[in-house]
Each structure stands twice: as structure tokens, then as C-alpha cells.
Image: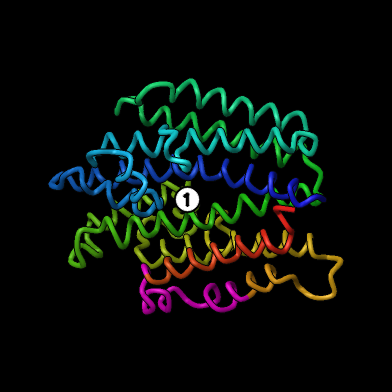
Amino acid sequence: MLGKTANGLYWMYRSLERAENTARLIETGQRIALTRLELGESEWRSVLQSAGSLEQFEANRDELTKDAAIDWLLRDRSNPSSVLSSIETSRQNARLVRTALTHEVWEATNAAYMSARDVLARKVVERDLPSVLSTLRQRTALVRGMTHGTMLRNDIYNFARLGTFIERADNTARILDVKYYVLLPSARAVGTSLDNVQWESILRSVSARGGFRMEYGAGAGTREIAHFLILDRRMPRSLAFCVRKLHDNLGYLSRDLRRPSPAQSKTLHFERTYLSHEIDAVFDFGLHEYVQKALRLLADLSAQIETDFRFYE
């Protein structure tokens, strides 16, 4: 496969996942903000920081308010990671690799773009925000469903999955960081009802509440939730699940090599060094520090994938 085709597939699905995940991040910030009524709107600085958009926001907007932050993350074309920009980028890449996609996948991608353009044509008022976010998530999920249901399990599929799971792991790490490091008011709140409500919001934001309750019941606490989102290989948005899938898909792409590719070796290092311990070791290391290390490893892995498969040749 040509490197530019692999690149288009990788970024098509990475951008699509980013759109859904940014919508989830907005919802997380909104839910957590509701538990902190005594504070002002400046806490949205923390959400922008975790989204990696704070510097660009400050360069493009005069004042940081809740409405401005949500609008920036949702629909501002000056923000290349906004939901609208990400879906547009996904569609552009889909057009470049149109012959590698099934008709159903292309139609679902195009429909996701048309829907996003319609619902984000004007600023979203707060009362409409939940329904808009739900619509955006459903449209991106439809593309994923069509991919699972109609695509051959070949190199095309594997590059699509690499983009999906790199972005998904990155998002889970960032949502954890929003909660634990930035939005938690103080160390005194750990273990309180406020802490529990915020963790509940995190579970909802990654569609993990039902699975978590099924596994742990209603009495589980902070460590169980963190374990579920970081180390549980059954949970499809956990770091461990995503890194394992990255390793598997890289293995399929490297099956003709005599030894693991550099990117595959990096996933093995990630698993063995950072995803094979108990959750207490993560907290001893420091959850924020651990998340930041995971984000650096994922960025390094993404760069290695681009190098290994010659994306720009």
C-alpha cells in the first residue's frame, strides 16, 4: 500500500475519533462544572488545557468564558481539533482514499459531515448542547459500525484501526487528567461525595458506567474506577485495551518482517513497563504524572508509525 494511502486512512479515522472524543470532553467538563457551582467559568481553562487547545484559544479569543470555550471546542474552524474541523478533516481524508473504502463507509462519513455542518451552523445554546453532542456521537459511531460491518480485514482496516486506537487512548488519558489533576478542587475532596460525583461523570463520558457497575457494583471507589479506565483489558476505552489493539494491528501489518517493527516494539514497551502493574503503583507514581507519561508515549508511537510506514512518500 502507498504511504499516502495509509496516511489518509490513519488520519481519516483518527480525526473521526477525535471529533467524538472532543464531544465527550465537552460533556465531561459540563458535568463536572455542575458539581462546582461556587466557582467561576475560568475552570474551562482546565478543559482547554487538557484538550491541548489553550494556547490557540488565547491567541484567537479575547476572553475565556464557558460559552467561548465550548464554542471553540465544538465548532470554531480556527481550531483544527474542534468537532466540526475534525469531521471535515476526516471527510477530506476519506475522499482521498475513497477507493479503499466501501460504499457504506463513505456514505456514513459523508452523512456525519452533513449532520455536523447542520447542527453546528450557529452557536449552540446550553439547553441544546446535550442533544447536539448526542447527535455528533451517534453519527461518528455509525461510521465505525459500517467499518466493522463492511470492511475486509486487510491492511486498509489495520491502518484505520491504528488511527482509532491511538486517538482513543490519548483521549482517555486526557479525560482522566481533566478529572484528577485539574478539576478536583483540593486534596481534601478525595473520597468525598464531590469526588464520587466527578468520577461518575468520567465513567459516563467514556460510556463506561454500565460496564463498571456490572463488574464492581455500586460501592466501588476511586481506585477501582482508575483501574477500569487504565488497566482493564476488557474495557474498550481503557489504555490497556487500546495499546493491546495497537500491538495486534501493528503485528498484522508487520507479519512479513523477521522481527517486530519499531512501532510494535514501542507498544510492547508501553504494555510491559506501564500497563502491567497494579493500580496502587500508578497512584504511587502519581496519576497526573502517569497520564502525562502515557501521552508522551502515545505521541512517540504515532510518530514512529508514520516513519515505519512512510506516510509522506
Q: Is residue 277 magenta?
A: yes
SS majority, magenta: helix
44 or 58, nearer to the observer = 58
Residue 9 coordinates in the image, percent (x, y) = 70, 45
Residue 119 to residue 186: above or below: above
Left or right of 135: which side holds 301?
right
Q: Residue at x 24, y 42 (%)?
A: 64
The amino acid pointed to by label 1 is: Ala
Residue 76 coordinates in the image, percent (x, y) = 40, 33
Report the coloring of the rendering.
Answer: rainbow
Q: Residue at x 43, y 21 (%)?
A: 121
Q: Residue at x 29, y 56 (%)?
A: 196
Residue 82 to residue 163: above or below: above
Residue 282 to residue 225: above or below: below
Q: Quadrant of residue 309?
A: bottom right
71 or 164, nearer to the observer = 71
Residue 36 to residue 88: above or below: below
Left or right of 259: which side holds 294?
left
Residue 167 coordinates in the image, percent (x, y) = 55, 52
Residue 14 coordinates in the image, percent (x, y) = 59, 47
Circle 1 residue: 208
- Which region shows up in magenta? 269-288
